[in-house]
Image (cartoon, rainbow, N blue to C red):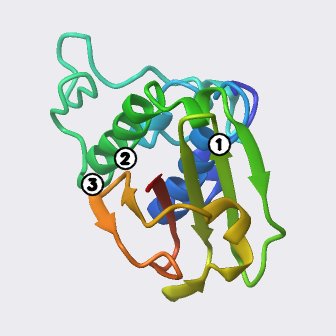
């Protein structure tokens, strides 16, 4: 919020950690709150001043060299972050498992946190990997939530995942899978 360090600053300006955090905020229970500028990696350290964390959103004024409304002047990381947030928010609004479903989560092991969001019509599996290396996640531990599913769709990449017994998860990433029968 407006009295704390901005999220991107608080995680050391690491885009992978940013994506993990945004995925968590947008897929866990409750109504997500995202402070303006988070979607374009605005930084701000409260120790410098509250004005530093409340800077103007880039763009919209004559003479602005960066315009987050049009994408003009954004860095590659800012553009990637903005697309990531937009994709997840657009997906989220049509995903009853996330907007109104239950939460089943499992005790994290080896810096891997897995949870499921489930509604009557839908199941979503979220895997957060904080490891510096990719992992192959054995899903035997999650059979109660995976029962009846044969494959899934990777929400971010729009790719089909057909092997659900051992799921490959990239290093320092969030994998969001919409389960399919």
CA gap, disc 3 and disc 1: 20 Å
Q: Quadrant of the C terminus?
A: bottom left
Q: Which residue is mark 3?
A: 158
Q: Residues within 10 Å of mark 2 (few under 14, many from 20)?
A: many
- Work out whether 17 lies above or below 30: below
Residue 89 can be seen in this image? yes
Is label 3 or label 1 in front? 1
Q: Which mark is residue 54?
A: none
In x, y percent, where is residue 150? 44, 67
**Helix, strand or loop at disc 2?**
helix
Q: Name the residue: 19% across, 33% down.
A: 71
Q: Name the residue: 68% across, 65% down.
A: 114
Q: Nearer the viewer, residue 41 or 27?
A: 27
In x, y percent, where is residue 60? 26, 12
Is tag 2's residue or tag 3's residue first in the polypeptide sequence? 2
Along the horizontal axis of the image, is 33 left or right of 107? Answer: left
Along the horizontal axis of the image, is 15 left or right of 127? Answer: left
Along the horizontal axis of the image, is 101 left or right of 134? Answer: right
In x, y percent, where is residue 175? 48, 63
Is tag 2's residue or tag 1's residue first in the polypeptide sequence? 2
CA gap, disc 2 and disc 3: 17 Å
Q: Which mark is residue 81?
A: 2
Q: Name the residue: 38% across, 51% down.
A: 155
Q: Quadrant of residue 61?
A: top left
Q: Quadrant of the N terminus?
A: top right
Is label 2 or label 1 in front? 1
Along the horizontal axis of the image, is 93 left or right of 120? Answer: left
Q: Which mark is residue 118?
A: 1
Q: Name the residue: 75% across, 27% down.
A: 3
**Helix, strand or loop at disc 1?**
strand
Q: Residues within 10 Å of mark 3 (few under 14, many from 20)?
A: few
């Amino acid at each position: 919020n407006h009295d704390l360090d901005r999220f991107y600053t608080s995680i050391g300006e690491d885009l992978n950690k940013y994506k993990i955090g945004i995925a968590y905020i947008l897929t866990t229970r409750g109504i997500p709150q995202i402070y303006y500028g988070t979607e374009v990696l605005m930084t701000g350290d409260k120790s410098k001043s509250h004005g530093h964390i409340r800077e103007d959103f880039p763009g919209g004024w004559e003479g602005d060299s960066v315009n987050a409304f049009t994408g003009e002047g954004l860095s590659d990381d800012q553009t990637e972050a903005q697309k990531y947030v937009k994709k997840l928010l657009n997906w989220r609004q049509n995903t009853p498992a996330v907007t109104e479903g239950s939460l089943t989560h499992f005790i994290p092991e080896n810096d891997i946190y897995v949870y499921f969001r489930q509604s009557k019509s839908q199941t979503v599996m979220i895997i957060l990997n904080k490891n510096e290396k990719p992992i192959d996640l054995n899903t035997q531990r999650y059979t109660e939530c995976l029962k009846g599913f044969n494959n899934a769709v990777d929400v971010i990449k729009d790719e089909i995942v057909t092997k659900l017994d051992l799921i490959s998860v990239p290093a320092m990433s969030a994998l969001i899978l919409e389960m399919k029968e």
